[in-house]
Image (cartoon, helix red, strand yellow):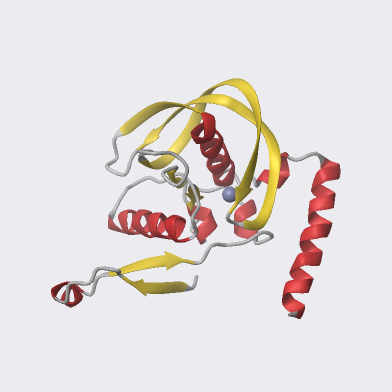
Amino acid sequence: MTVKKIQSTRTSANEMFYNDFMAVLEIRKYPEKILKQKTIPLQTIDGNTQRLIDDMIETMHAARGVGLAANQVGISQKLCVLDLSLTENKAPLIVLINPVIVERDGIVEAEEGCLSIPGYLTSLKRAGKVFIKGVNREGKDVAMEAEGLLARAIQHELDHLEGLLFIDRMSPIKREFFKRRYKKQMKEAKGK
Ligand code: ZN
């Protein structure tokens, strides 16, 4: 895994002595294999987990995403972060460890994109409301109900943790069309 380090934007000279770095990790892109693999539930939450969570939050913010799963940065662990503050005022930062959807309600069709499939948006049907359970970064059990964009983002990230991308939820015809277009785009990008 390559790690691109950027210096903190803090300006105080004293703070420089703390060697205060934030790590923005490389986001894995389709069709990398790790994105197709089911992630492994966490047994313990240690210092490495906390560091990974902080780096995932930095990476999500740097990429201007609203959610990021650990396997998107090359770590096959059942962990994701969400932050809708780009689109909604006062949206909380959410860290979910070993999350599961225990209830779904309704169907809503809306457009979504993925940091691992840049430049591609598609309209997908997903549950309008979800009830989830999991563990937060302090190791405490959490349960929450979500609707709207948060419900969509949670379903998208939990799909990642199961090794599923949004293209796996498209109709076979639409998916074939996407694959052809994506391959062509990749070839053109390489040719430049
Ligand atoms: Zn995604």
| Residue 180 in the image: above or below residue 160 | below
| Residue 83 in the image: above or below residue 187 | above
Where's the C terminus, which quadrant? Answer: bottom right
| Camera-side residue of 20 and 35 | 20
- For residue 103, side relative to residue 190 (left or right): left
Q: Position of residue 121 (x, y in %)?
A: 68, 48
| Camera-side residue of 96 and 127 | 127
| Camera-side residue of 89 and 154 | 89
Q: What's the residue at 49%, 55% (across, down)?
A: 64
- For residue 76, say whether it is visible: no
Among the 4 quarters of the image, the one containing residue 89? top left
| Residue 152 in the image: above or below residue 26 | above
- For residue 160, side relative to residue 175 (left or right): left
Q: Position of residue 48 (x, y in %)?
A: 32, 59
Quick one: which residue is furthest to the bottom in this view?
A: 192
Q: What's the residue at 73%, 77% (across, down)?
A: 190
